[in-house]
Structures are given as structure tokens and as C-alpha cells.
Amino acid sequence: MLRGDVLAALPRVAYRRQVMAVRMGKRQIIAVNDPEVVRDVFITRAANYGRKSHFKEQALQPVIGKSLFANHGEIWTTRRPPIGRLLHPSGVGRLQPLFQQVGAQLAARWAGLAGEGGLVDVAPDLATATLDVMLLAVFGPGVPEGEARAIAEAFTRFQSQVQVIDLPYLLGLPNWLAGRHKRATLRAAAEIQARIAGLIAMLPGEEGYLGGLRALKDEDGQPLLDETGLLEEVAMLLLAGSETAANALAWTLYLLSTHPEWQDRVREEVFGLLGERAPEAGELNALVVTKAVIQEGMRLYPPVAVLARQPLAPDRIRRWTIQPGDTLLCIPWLLHRHEAIWEHPHAFHPERFLPENAKAIPRFAYLPFGLGPRVCAGAAFGMAEMTTFLAMLLQRFDLGPGPVPVPRFRLTLRPEGGMRLLLRPRAAVGPAAANGPPALP
Ligand code: HEM
């Protein structure tokens, strides 16, 4: 845990426990692993648990500063509602051409690589593609080529270096010792911020979220975000909106590579509805199998595998007392695999998420987008983007497994050292193309 490998530190019994507490140095860490307690803390008592925790704040600070994601109090209260409206699901449909365009570019790139018949590390390309989407959504057209790859690489360097557990803080050492970062972490963060500042200065961004962020006003009619605020909120959107989706897709492709029968089911649905073309916004809801596969992918590998909070006032959770300096964890990785809640918790069974079975999903036990007032503001965006990408990729490739990937949770749940898969371009259209004549005319 102190090395920052939170998931590897979890004992086997954690998959059956409801609440666990551990004292480390001067601080206590309490993990809630029971849906009722999760609901109680994140919804009923949300006002006391608005703070994202010292650990998350200090880990994210070099890139996103005081942005709403890692903040509480006035900054969160004034920024979350208007930024939530900018990202509202009703506006996501107009981004569909972006999802299609970037999905097609990704497929074309992989067709070139896969043509060589080898394994392809899909992780960096997915990070670049999802960042490409976010850059276009924020800045509109005009983002220089190569920018997405450069920022995605800097994010990767940042994540691999960043200290997620702050030991001096746990030990209760003075503030000036806590919250310090390695030089490499700060260098990667500075590069990300400099690139984003360059884009903000260069592009009007009227067609994207940047224009919307610039136009936000406070109650006196003054701009809500000054220059720093704008930079930090843009950095937050780029990070929150790309890393998560890229990792969810990487793990979903991996699961599909080891479950060819589910590849067939997705293709059957996609070819049946769309043939060879990309989905339109109005068609995404009909891709129920494709979506169920993504939802099951995020159950087994939740991109935000740990949610952290710090109480503002002392509180009691079951028989434990939690103090303001302590940390509360809700670990979707555990909750999603809880052995008393899920049937076959560690197995890939996307049928759980098909509409006819959805009622059986236990409430407050499936939280890929978090819950309560701080629930993900971009969930509809993320689902539309991932569904479009997955449909387009399975139209073009058969997936085969590569080396077994190792999950590592830093800020998101990444495959340690990448995700290498066998990508075989499909010669003809149709669900059964690989094994016989195409089923569609
Ligand atoms: C697969 C895709 C995504 C996943 C799994 C995901 C997951 C999450 C989770 C779990 C949280 C809550 C964290 C916490 O409570 O500690 C969150 C917050 C947030 N997400 Fe996402 N996210 C995704 C995509 C996006 C996208 C595409 C955007 C923007 C376009 C976005 C914007 C945000 C914002 C602004 C917050 C902060 C909300 C707040 O603190 O009030 N997310 N996300």
C-alpha cells in the first residue's frame, strides 16, 4: 500500500468484509464495502463527506490545481452546477461525429499495425484517441497534430511517478513535509500545463467547452474563472474525460479477447443494426449487448477503482469513529467483486447488464461513475464515446489475447506495462465473417 499499489495490498478476506479499518501512523483509513453503508455515507451524509481526501487532492494538484474535481466548499459549489450543465447528457449527441471520426482514425492506425500480424499495445493508442476526443470537444477544430499523443504520454509519465499515498501525512508530520512530489512528477505536470496553456492562448475554442467555460459568470456578472481557473478546469476535463474511458476500453477489449463468444454477440448486434457504418447518436441505446459488455468490463476493472473522502466533522461508521484527518475509502474494485453480493463475482458475465436482467443489479454495489452529489459529470459522454469506439473496432478486428495484463491502480486502473492484444483485421463484413460467408448482403 505504501508503495502505492493499493489493490495488491488487499487481503483475500476484503472481498467478503463490509467495513474494514486500519490505523497507519497517526491516521485511520476506513474502507466501506457494504452497499447500505456506501449509500449512507455518499448520499445521506454526503454533506459531511464532500472532501475528496488529502491523498486525492495532493496527488492531482500538480496537474489540475484547485479544479472542482479535487475540491470542495465554495469552488465546488460554484463550479459544479454550470460545468455539469455544459456536460449535460442532452448535449452529448452533437459530439457523435467526433467519436466517429476519432474511432475511424484509431481503426485505420490499428489496421496498419495489425497488418504486420503481431501484438499491438492498445493502451497508448486508446489514451491518445480518448484525449483526441477531449481536445476536440474542448477546443474545437485546430488542435495541432501530435498534441494528443504528447499530452497522453505526459499523463502516463505523471501517473507512473505520482505518489498516491502520502507517508508524511499518514505519520502526522508537519504540513511542509507532506504533499511533496518527485521532480519527475512535477516535470510531467508542468509539461501538461504548458501544452494546455499554449492551446488556450492559440485557439478561440468557441465551438467547444472552452467557449462555454469562458462565458461562465459569477453572481456579480464577472467571469467565474480567471486565467488559472480556466487552465485548471480544462486540465481536469482532459484528464477526467480521457484516462477513464481509455482504461475502461483497454480492459473491455482484453476481456473480449479472452471471450470470443461475446465478440460474436457484439458483432451480431452491431452488424445487424448498422452493417459496416458507424453508429449515429440515436442508435446507441439500441446497442444493448455492446453496452452490457462495457458495463461488465467496468465492473471487473473500474477505471476509478478507489473513491476517497475525508469527513469534515467526526462521525461514526458502524462501530468505528472517524475523525476529520482520517480517510474513508469506497473501493469499487472490491464492491464490484464482493463475494456476498455478486454471483460469480470474478467472472465475465455481461448478460447481467442486459435490459431484461438490469433490475437484479444490486443497488449501490455498482459504482463505475461514483454516486451522490459528486457523481461523474461526464458519464453520458463517456458511455456514448466508448459504445461508438467498441462498435467500430469490433466491426474491423477479431481480438486475440496477448500476455495476461496486471492491473495497477494509481489515479486510474491501468494495465501495468501496457495491454498487448492480437488484432486480426477482418476480411469481410458480417458476424460470421471469420468462419464462413458473411451473414449480411
Ligand atoms: C469511462 C468513463 C468515465 C468514468 C469511469 C468516470 C468516472 C468518474 C468517477 C468515479 C467520478 C467520481 C470520483 C469521486 O467521487 O471521487 C468522476 C467524476 C467526474 N468526472 Fe468522470 N468518468 C468518466 C468519464 C468522464 C468524462 C468523459 C468527463 C468529461 C467530459 C468526466 C468528468 C468528470 C467530472 C467533471 C467529475 C467531477 C465531479 C465532481 O467532483 O463533482 N468524466 N468520474
Image (cartoon, rainbow, N blue to C red):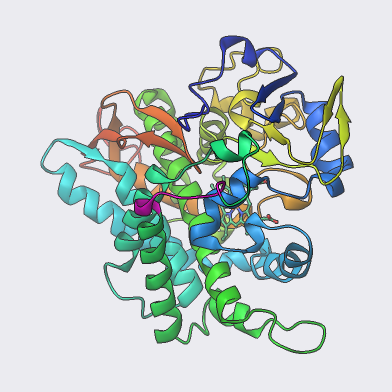
Q: Quick check: 337 left or right of 264?
A: right
Placement of 406 over or under 229, stated as above or below: above
Q: Was residue 164 drawn as part of the magenta stretch in this picture?
A: no
User: Residue 350: where, in percent of width, then height?
Assistant: 55, 28
Q: How many marks?
A: 0
Nearer the observer, 347 or 243: 243
Nearer the observer, 68 or 269: 68
Q: Residue at x 63, y 15 (%)?
A: 15
Q: Quick check: 367 left or right of 231?
A: right
Among the 4 quarters of the image, the one containing residue 21? top right
Nearer the observer, 11 or 338: 11
Among the 4 quarters of the image, the one containing residue 24? top right
Seen from this angle, which residue lies furthest top?
13
Q: Residue at x 32, y 23 (%)?
A: 404
Q: Residue at x 55, y 47 (%)?
A: 177
Q: Residue at x 77, y 50 (%)?
A: 50
Placement of 109 over or under 267, stated as above or below: below
Seen from this angle, which residue lies furthest left?
116
- Whether residue 103 is visible, yes or no, is no
Q: Main secondary structure of the magenta part?
A: loop
Q: Quick check: 182 left or right of 352?
A: left
User: Residue 16: where, in percent of width, then height?
Assistant: 67, 12
User: Residue 254: where, in percent of width, then height?
Assistant: 37, 31
Placement of 245 over or under 259, stated as above or below: below
Among the 4 quarters of the image, the one containing residue 148? bottom left
Seen from this angle, which residue lies furthest bottom?
221
Nearer the observer, 322 or 77: 322
User: Residue 78: where, in percent of width, then height?
Assistant: 77, 70
Task: Provide the residue span drawn in magenta.
Answer: 177-185
- Whether residue 415 is visible, yes or no, is yes
